[in-house]
Amino acid sequence: MRNEIRELRTAGELSQADLARALDVSRQTINAIETERYTPSLPLAFALARYFGKSIEEVFHADGSS
Amino acid sequence: MQTAAAKPRGSRLWVPALVAGLAVPTFVAFWIGGDPRAGVIWGSLSIVFALVLAVGGRSDTVRLLRGEDDDERGVALGLQATTLTAVVLIVALAGLFLVTAARGESPLVYGILLLLAEVTHLGALAVLNRRS
């Protein structure tokens, strides 16, 4: 699933490890989400969107569009 | 609504210790069976695997095996790996069952294990279906 996590993270000058710590997941999980190798659960998707102050639709794109 | 957090499960050494600990009953079983040498060989395999788990700290795969940083992705990967393992085992058991029967030997042990797998799968599906 396409997402804006990497863009939002780098805009906030956060490392993958920083974001992982904030959301209590592993750095590998953040990397896997950013590279679209892993689709997060709904709770984690909401947590990510909330962390960046966005709606879930602004962060994740189920249809693959931006 | 909660995410499965990445929480270390205590010491990073408990899984390797558990695997290494299997060497003892393995050796004892072979020793009781009159073949302590085979017990040493099979027990050593447990210890080698435990050492790989204990010293392979830089590998993400080994960290997942040890149950470290076991967040929702780790749990999902573990479930998929377990499913694949079960499929391989069941196919191997079915193959051994058929080969043993074709040789004119009793495939009872393989049959019981296959039945156990089938009953466990059915039971698990029934329970999970009720709970979800």
Image: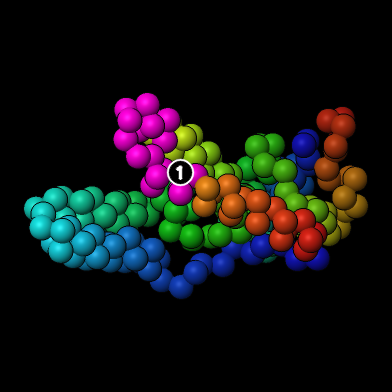
Give left or right: position of B17 versus A56. left
Q: Residue furthest front?
A: B104
In percent of width and height, residue A51 lies at: 79, 60
Give left or right: position of B9 versus A29. left
Query: Is B107 contained in the magenta span?
Result: yes
Q: Residue furthest top?
A: B102
- Which part of the image, by quadrant, shows the C terminus of chain B? bottom right
Q: Residue at x 20, y 56 (%)?
A: B43
Give left or right: position of B124 versus B19. right
The residue to which callout 1 is attached is: B111
In percent of width and height, residue B104 lies at: 33, 30
In percent of width and height, residue B52 lies at: 30, 51
**Looking at the rendering, which quadrant does residue A43 occupy?**
bottom right
Q: Is residue B77 visible?
A: no
Q: Residue at x 67, y 62 (%)?
A: B4
Residue under mark 1: which chain is it in?
B
In percent of width and height, residue B91 lies at: 48, 34
- Which part of the image, by quadrant, shows the N terminus of chain B? bottom right
Query: Is B82 contained in the magenta span?
Result: no
Query: Given the image, on which type of amino acid does mark 1 rest?
Result: Gly
Above or below, A19 relative to B97: below
* Count of marks, rendered view: 1
Q: Residue at x 22, y 65 (%)?
A: B24
Name the secondary structure under disc 1.
Answer: helix
Tell me the magenta residue range. Answer: B97-114
Classified by dominant secondary structure, the portion drawn in magenta counts as helix
